[in-house]
Amino acid sequence: MKTIKIIFLLLFFFSAKSTYAQVGSAFYEEEPITNVIFVFQNKLADSLLEKNLEQTVKRAFPVFPQTTVRNLLLDAYLNKVRKLEQVADAHYEIIPSPIGGIDITLTVVISDKVQQHNEKSGLLTGGKDFPVMYQDNKSLLTSKFALAEMLYTNNNAWYGRDDTMLNGNPLAKNPSGKGFSGWLEGWASAGLYGITALSTKHNLYLYGGASYLISGSAGRELFTDKTRGYGAFDDAFIGLLGTKEYSGGNRFAYNLSVGRQKFSVGNGFIIKNTASNGDNRAALQLNPRWAADYLGLASVKYNNWLLQFFRLNPDELPAVDSRTKIQGLNLEWGDAYAHQIGFMALGVPQSSFSYYTPTGNVFGRKGLQLFNLRYYSNSLPNIGGLFYKAEVAYERNTNFKMSAFAGYSEIGWNFKNSKKASALKYRYAYFSGDNPNTETYERWDPLLSGGTGEEWVIGANHFKIVQNSNLIVHQLQGNIRPFPKMELVPQFLYMYAAKNNNIGGNPALSYMPQKEYATEINITVKYFSSRHWYWHGHLAYTIPGAGTKNTLGNNTRPWFSAMLFFRYSL
């Protein structure tokens, strides 16, 4: 019996280790940048001087689309902009883009008089610039603080069949099931981050930081009604950054970093959720932890080309730590806005995670090799129009016969000039299942896929039961902005299995006589109250499909969930 429980945990929790991620990180760290928008206020009368100043600002704030966010660097670049002689003030704002990723808007207030800026400032110099602790022309030391609280309720969680869906799960102690249940969870984090110039002549910088995060849960959640809290360091890293500009306009940059860090590739189809939440760490739905146990990352960028080498050890839950290690390379080319092509190859040199088959054969993740090709075509900023994304991926293993495929195609229209609708898109996604009549193992291993409900958490309720394996999805999504600070995201999802054999997923659905998993309708409401406050809520209604109903003895109920949370960051 003990062995069965361990197998259940490995099957369910590793593939679902960030199952409940419905929001991004507190500081949008490592999120892909879709658009960078510069807004200049109080423009100069001399158009030539104005043009030169705008170019100087853009050189001081070298943030580009199709790269990823590093908040410490954003703050350092902002510090440079603010110290320019004809800049009275400057600030940046980050808001999720309706077509995926985030938009960064830098607003610069120009003055026709030369501004006198203090050489040194910050709280440690007697200033009132909190959260900035210290800054001068070479260095920046800043603090970060964030917290979030959430209320969550379910009606008929697990389709009212928690007795079967959680049977054998040792973590299931008075979980949510038939009827209504609810809980409260929250987290708070604080950290220090700094960057200093080792050589201004060669644009060489040393940076690093660390933060501590406390999380807690109370009430009757999906697995337990146990009240608990947990505290630990979240991220803790150090890095070396260098840049060089050539006379012809070419740019070269390199970035080397090690430590506890968040890491993602593309839009999270393969790698996104590098840390686990829930269980003893609490905050199951808020999903505050994203930093891997260890990430060694070397990035080299030349104009529109980016090459990355990485070695990654995800921060798994102690109860199901498979000691998986992933290493690989990622190559990207992008023209700054409209087009991006990417290729990733990775391998798993170490892991105790297992694959199970109907014949009783047990294979292992160790030796897994993955190859991923992607293409994104985005609409241009402030113009709108067609956007398109597609990825394909193939998995094999050096230790046994394995051939697994996954891919998706996404097409949409960005209504940039419309006040009522921002974007509408359709996505078809496929993750292979295992055919028990062949010697080859074909079930897709989702690795670290995930993110938010608009990325690769497929279904607010459904993803808690079926992760991104042996799955086919039709998804229709709108991003509607009736007001500048409010966004509505309705989704319609129809999900079914690629194969009837579903061993490797939830044990209650190991064999599906019919392939229909579920249909889900949900809506998310986002309110960007200010630069520091963010409010988020959702309603989700999931109807079990014929395959799920039949497998569970035709004794199921639709699953309804509602959630409301706020996040404050400084």
Image (cartoon, helix red, strand yellow):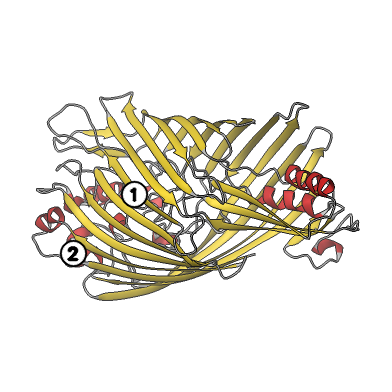
Any mark on residue 554, and which?
A: none
Distance in Å between CA atoms under marks 1 and 2: 35 Å
Instruction: Report crowding for label 2: few under 14, some 14 to 19, many 20 or more residues within 10 A (C-alpha).
Output: some
Q: Residue at x 9, y 48 (%)?
A: 513
Tag 1, which secondary structure? Answer: strand
Judge whether 561 appears above or below 98 on screen: below
From this viewpoint, is residue 274 visible? no
From this viewpoint, is residue 68 visible? yes
Q: Which residue is mark 2?
A: 163
Tag 2, which secondary structure? Answer: helix
Judge whether 352 appears above or below 421 on screen: above
Q: In the picture, which quadrant includes the C terminus? A: bottom right
Judge whether 310 appears above or below 96 on screen: above
Any mark on residue 426, and which?
A: 1
Amino acid beneath label 1: Tyr
Amino acid beneath label 2: Asp
Residue 556 at x, y percent in the picture: 15, 65
Instruction: Report crowding for label 1: few under 14, some 14 to 19, many 20 or more residues within 10 A (C-alpha).
Output: some
